[in-house]
Amino acid sequence: MTKKDQRRIILEMCRSQRKAMLERLPRIPEQWDGHELRALFLDVATYGYGHSTMDGKRRKDYRNTCYIANL
């Protein structure tokens, strides 16, 4: 995958995440600050669109790369 393709996918994921968070905004308590919003952001990113389809060796390789590359 080219860097251009990677960039396009990342931007698409960011747009989707932004849309998902803004859709939840009316239900977010006013007293929440950055701590709760960050936690919600991570939960939506992790669970909001279902679980990853990666399994087995591919997931293990992914986690290893994230660890080694400090992603």
Image: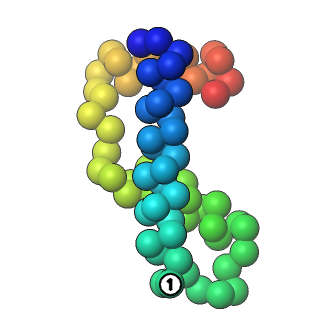
Please tell me which residue is depicted at 72% across the width and 67% down the height of the picture: 34
Q: Label 1's element?
A: helix
Q: x%, y% of residue 29?
A: 59, 86
Q: Is residue 53 above or below residue 17?
A: above
Residue 52 placement (x, y as % from top left)? 32, 38
Provide residue 48's location: percent of width, then percent of height.
38, 57
Quarter in which the N terminus is drawn: top left
- Report the residue at 43% width, 52% height from top: 16
Q: On the rendered structure, is 70 left or right of 12?
A: right
Task: Return the residue found at the far top.
Answer: 2
Can residue 24 be seen at all in this image of the molecule? yes
Asked if residue 70 lies left or right of residue 24, the reply is right
Query: In this rendering, does residue 64 appear at all?
Result: no
Colour pattern of the rendering: rainbow
Query: At x 44% / y 41%, what residue is drawn?
Result: 12
**Residue 65 lies in quadrant:** top right
Q: Amino acid at mark 1?
A: Pro
- Give the crowd class for mark 1: few <14, some 14-19, many >=20 residues within 10 Å: few
Point out residue 17 in the picture as x, y percentages from the top left corner: 48, 54
Most foreground residue, 38 or 61: 38
